[in-house]
Amino acid sequence: MKHPPGLKGFLLALGLLLGLLVLATGVALLGYLALEAYFAPPGWTLLLLALLVLVPGAILIGRLFPWLTDWYYFLPALSFLLVFTLYPIGLTLYLAFTDYSGAKNGFPDRSTETRVVKQEGNRLTLEEPVREALRCDPCRGEPVEVYAEGHRARAKVLEAEGSTLLLDRALPFPAAFVAKVNAFRFVGLKNFAFILSQASQALLPVFAWNVVFAGATVLLNALVGLVLGLILNNKALKLRNFYRTVLIVSWALPGVITVQVWVALLNYNFGAINRLLGVLGIYPIPWLNDPDWAKVAILLVNLWLGFPYMMTATLGALSTIPDELYEAAKVDGATPWQALWGITLPLLEKPMVPILLSSFAFNFNNFYIIYLLTGGGPAQEGRLATAQATDILISWAYKTAFSAEGQSAYGLGAAISLLIFLLTVAISLVNFRVTGALREVR
């Protein structure tokens, strides 16, 4: 595709396309909100308004920059990127600085819906006293939604006295009902201050276990995968392909199902593992009921799920090592151990380091194993109800966002997600710097 030479030309082309999409989206949203004051537009109105800006805009930019028309094939992909990647990131960043929750979700509270019996401009008379009907005291500044059939509009209360409600704007339609809006507000760094104030009960212990969980998982999986890979790489081993097939089964099966099977196997009273231990004369182990044993159970189940990946990666890396190196070492009198330490492991380092780093990043946010196996539990004394013994940062954020104190605290959950992002980036940068994974080879 054509564009001005160099990086600046590439960025110019990308910036023009993204700018066009952002402009079309912004105009569509503003137009939709303007139409809401007169009637309740259907959802497809947004798409129609966006296309009314996007198509003429694309033609105009194409005339100003003729070389850009080749890039229009990227518009669908960039649209999906904008909607499903950039928008959720931006929304999370915005909500992290608000008190958005289940009780403050920006939607009208239908339980406060009250009939309007009289309307004079921006002055409404309700069939009940305003403070009791809208459950606000004082009501000044409270946002409300006024609506009738096919129309709705939002306004703020300037004054409330008895059954009379004075709004900050006149309505372009005769109002039938009014309801208070469960508005959320910008709270600045309040969410982050709360997280830091509860650091000893949630952030620090959860983060410490998160690092241990990700690090121990990578270490155990890599060690077991390396040993099995070295064994299965031996061409003299009989039934080698059969062993490979059997050992990869745990990776091939859906993890959502197998984790549920492990929950049953690790049950304290009825699980097959504790029954087997009982036959051997060993007391039952509280795999999922004790904080320490629950962590051991998570590491073992995650080992069972993850070692086939490391084994396959090891076998792939071993296949790239020429046999001539081992033959030359054997001629020089090297033992198998010397060949392992002098040839195999050094040559495995380069291809395996990026795999180990990506595995650490994956397990640092490995939500499903925690959620399905222990649900973050069991409870531990001195910890928040949303940050229990085996919770990692991402499960803590999920529980905070969807079940904090009996309601959803999305703003607080978004703030935790933002902290997770910053911590993940910091740990990744340290890993890259220490291991030299991104260092240029000269």
Image (spheres, grey):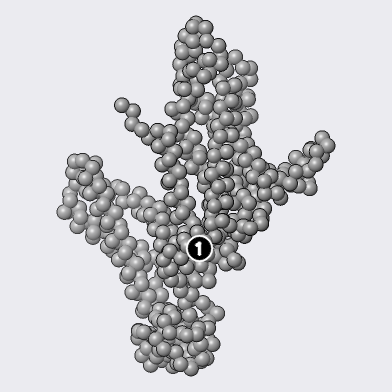
> Which residue does the image show at 62% across and 54% down from the upper left?
388
Q: Quadrant of the N terminus?
A: top left
Dot 1 amino acid type: Phe
Image x and y of residue 395, in percent: 56, 53
Residue 63 occupies which quadrant of the picture? bottom left
Left or right relative to 35: residue 348: right
Does residue 194 sit above or below 124 in this rendering?
Answer: above
Left or right relative to 252: residue 33: left
Element assignment for label 1: helix
Image x and y of residue 312, in percent: 54, 29
Q: Within 10 angstroms of label 1, few (less than 14), some, or many (20 or more) residues?
A: few
Is residue 367 visible in the rendered image? The answer is: no
Is residue 67 visible in the rendered image? The answer is: yes
Image x and y of residue 288, in percent: 70, 48
Q: Quadrant of the C terminus?
A: top left
Left or right relative to 404: residue 191: left
Image x and y of residue 170, in percent: 35, 86
> Which residue does the image show at 52% across and 15% down from the upper left?
339
> Which residue does the image show at 34% across and 51% down from the upper left?
78
Question: Could you say which is closer to the camera, residue 34 or residue 205?
Answer: 205
Residue 59 occupies which quadrant of the picture? bottom left
Question: Could you say which is closer to the camera, residue 422 or residue 37?
Answer: 422
Does residue 187 sit above or below 326 in this rendering?
Answer: below
Residue 90 occupies which quadrant of the picture? bottom left
> Which residue does the image show at 25% across and 47% down from the upper left?
11
| Residue with the mark numbered 1 | 194
Please tell me how many numbered marks the rendered image carries: 1
